[in-house]
Image (cartoon, grey):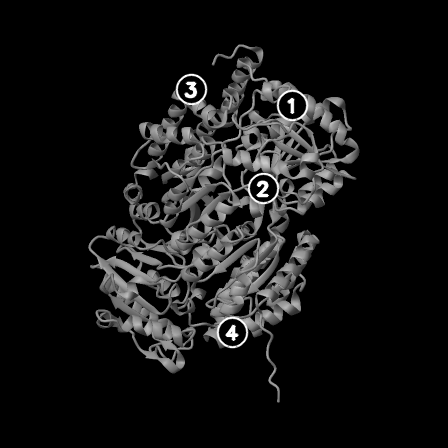
Amino acid sequence: MMEEVKPEFDSDKAAVLVNELRKTFNSGKTKSYEWRISQLESISKMIDEKEKEIVEALRKDLSKPELEAFLSEILMARSSCKLALKELKQWMMPQKVETSLATYPSSAEIVAEPLGVVLVISTWNFPFSLSLDPVIGAIAAGNAVVLKPSEIASATSSLLSRLVGEYMDKSAIIVVEGAVAETSALLEQKWDKIFFTGGARVGRIVMAAAAKNLTPVTLELGGKCPAVVDSNVNLQVTSRRIVAGKWVCNNGQACISVDYIITTKELAPKLIATLVSVVEEIFGKDLMESKERSRIINSFHFKRLVNLLEEDKVSNKIVFGGQREESQLQIAPTILLDVPEDSMIMQEEIFGPLLPIITVERLEDSFAMINRKPKPLAAYLFSDDEQIKRKFVQNICAGGMAINDTILQVTVPTLPFGGVGESGMGSYHGKFSFDAFSHKKAVLYRSFAGDSPTRYPPYTPGKKKQIKALLSGKLLNIMLALLGFYKD
Amino acid sequence: MEKSIAELRETFKTGGTKSISWRKSQLKALLQLINQNEDSIFKALDQDLGKSPVESYRDEVGVLKKSVTYTLSCLEKWVAPKKAEVPLLFFPAKAEVMPQPLGVVLIFSSWNFPFTLALDPLIGAISAGNTVLLKPSDLAPACMSFLVETIPKYLDNKAVKVLAGGADIGERLLQLKWDKIFFTGSPRVGRLVMAAAAKHLTPVTLELGGKSPAIVDTLSTTPSKAKVTAKRIVGGKWGPCTGQACIAIDYVLVEEKLASTLIELLKKTIKRFYGENIKSLKNISRIVNKHQFQRLVNLLKDPDVADSIVYGGSVDEEKLVIEPTILLDPPLDSEIMSEEIFGPLLPIITLKNVEESIDFINSKSNPLVIYAFTEDETFKKRILSETSSGTVTFNDSMVQFLCDSLPFGGVGQSGFGRYHGKYSFDTFSHEKSILHRGFYPEIEPRYPPWTDFKLLFLKLAYQFDYFGLILLLLGFKRS
């Protein structure tokens, strides 16, 4: 019996695909408001009609609890889509801008146009929303799109492939499944934009590939997102919000999860106690039995996290949790106290359910520690002290920040979501998604009325004075110059 | 070199460059530098490029003065955090976006506008609170020396440095880690810059080039409009550095029956502006060096191209001068029609119908600017929606550069990122999102244990269906 060999998706196939999409784009089809709305409506319908299948795929890939799947994936994507549907007309309108005396008479505007054929590469931890959210932006901006979901979240990847094929315009929106080989084949092609969510290592590879074609990129990477906790806070609420931002959020496997905590030596014991009580309240006393947490995505990451725990000088710093079960790919919510700054767990992004707490003498000492590390995607502060808040906001550089909460800053559609330095470049969400996939074209309208000879040769001293006056923008000077009275 | 950059990083860490007063003092010092050294600047530009003082003032000194003054007047507004609307669901909450400097930035500038292209980005970088290393082009050596010697006399040496040198220095700089690289130059080098930046995940702005076309559709309107069109084309081709400008008109598209009218008008205008022939050439810069001169001369060597010359064509190798030259319909596959010309040669391509311009332009890569001389509103709309370029300017050339409220940058092969006015400040900033929350009230449904009630709550919350939420909380909604 002959085994059916799936045809390889190689560079040639990728080139053919891009060609087809370019033809579609060049036909102008994706630029029309009607097409964009129809596709966004299809996405909305797709999410509504296939809710159950989406939840099931997320359960298969990550054991994601149903509500978490809704909270962080389905509802996010749906809300993104609805916002685009509501605002698209507004976003597509040219933006009039002021012109100065230097170009009088003139009028100017900025017109948004699609970039063309774009590539969206998404990741495995929120495999549904991190795939659809950028795609929604790309479609709203009028582009043709290829989506490459992560093969590590394989159930969601094949679901996306099937659903997009069923609901969306196949001539303009395509899902390519696969791993390194397929991604490399795609990266060899010429795109008008590449949007990548993932780790810094692959981010570098993506940007280097983009450089060959001068393709602009948005890179949503990660980092160690710190949470600084002051002693003047409501510890109960603070702990709940930290727990929400760590173990309720894909079990710590999120780029904006609280990676580690910094607090004063004085507060640490109380903070730990409150965190423990909140964890037990939310997940029950038998932490390994709880069905309310996602599991670790796969063996590779499970082993990676266990290694972080088993490093010398780290393993004896566990103050809570530490239990693990490889067959379930589960690690209990684990808190560590004062691990050394040069340990692996404090050097790399944890991306899991381990929470180191570092203590300092004075809260301000935490700022220097954070600034010693690469800039993170998010930084959090819990404090009631206005001065500390101000210092934190002024001195810490991160993609985004939340004061007295975690995670929620990415759900506010009027705030751009993106990194800086090692945590990435570019941003999206809300209108920023539309902007990320648009070229903002500058347009200047001039007329034939009033063509002053000032600009043209022969260049006399009088003209030089006129140009000086004109560029100074001061009306009086201009008038004086034209009348011959302007002094140099 | 590494020491210099380490010093820039140390200076940035101290936080000195973040203060508004530091930024303003540096900008004021830069304005002083320009005001007090105008003559030296004119001299350097004349030495490197043969620019006349009026051209130098118009394209370099004046532009920079305007840019600094504008930035100084707007700086406080730009630095202030911008409030963002927060959904009622998060009440009480406050959201804002706060611009922050990126850190230590590298600026590469080009040789054709050696002051503007070096100092305009510098203005942006300083206004955004960064420390800067400026690497001017060594192909404009007098200007580069001027910058190396003069900037340290006016600006804070610990925060703004200028490095002289050629491509080898550039390569070494690219190996180091920067928080932003701003590059003006050719697509070929742009690729190298971006590839080097990728190693450190450094964001880049690339201001590149392309073949910026001018569509001409106003010759059969009125004689005076036709004249003005010709003046603006001539001014937009040979005015800026004798065509050596990324926004210079590269080639013209016109209907074939109007080609001779256009050529006659252009000839008259050229003679009036620049002189009767190469011997009496005035008011125009020269070619920057032998290499560029040879490149341009080679474009004309192709016999079919040489045959298409209808005006000019004379060259003076000693003086590095090529007179304004017009060609009529050179072969479309010749080098002069496939590469960016960057010089005083103007091909005129004729079409049966001026509307064909759109397909012609789309057959080439996205230019930095499309110029269109037309009063036909439908045609204008078609040009806007069916072509893609950094900028579109209707019925004029070059002046869009003076409009601070318009972003200046390319798309596709002409680059990405933008600057001028506030865009300069933005390009060197990180816009940080901040959400401020209070401790009360708590949104319980965020937390497990999960229940049907919480699911319904979240569904309604995501839709910002406040009425539904009230009903739910009052017990009138059931899952």
The amino acid sitting under disc 4 is Ser
For the residues labelled 4 and 1, say whether their Cβ atoms are less than 8 Å apart.
Answer: no
Q: Secondary structure at mark 1?
A: helix
For the residues labelled 4 and 2, say whether their Cβ atoms are less than 8 Å apart.
Answer: no
**B46 vs B292, nearest the viewer:** B292
Q: Secondary structure at mark 4?
A: helix
* Mark 1 → mark 2, Cα distance in angstroms: 24 Å
Nearest to N terminus: mark 3 or mark 2: 3
Nearest to N terminus: mark 1 or mark 3: 3
> Would you say B340 lies left or right of A374 here?
right
| Residue mark closest to the camera, 1 vs 2 | 1
* Mark 3 → mark 4, Cα distance in angstroms: 68 Å
Instruction: Residue under label 3, please give it.
Output: B39
**B172 vs A134, nearest the viewer:** B172
Q: Chain of mark 2?
A: B
Same subunit, labels 4 and 2: the answer reads no
Mark 2 crowd level (few <14, some 14–19, many ≥20, 10 Å Cα): many
* Mark 4 → mark 2, Cα distance in angstroms: 43 Å
**B15 vs A330, nearest the viewer:** B15
**B235 vs B452, nearest the viewer:** B235
Q: Chain of mark 1?
A: B
Residue beneath the point at 67% across and 45% down = B333
Instruction: Residue under label 4, please give it.
Output: A154
The amino acid sitting under disc 2 is Gly
| Residue mark closest to the camera, 4 vs 1 | 1
Q: Position of residue B386 (x, y in %)?
A: 68, 46
**Residue B457 seen anywhere in this rendered image of the structure:** no
Instruction: Residue under label 1, please give it.
Output: B270
> Would you say B278 lies left or right of A268 here?
right
| Residue mark closest to the camera, 4 vs 2 | 2
Q: Chain of mark 4?
A: A
For the residues labelled 1 and 3, say whether their Cβ atoms are less than 8 Å apart.
Answer: no
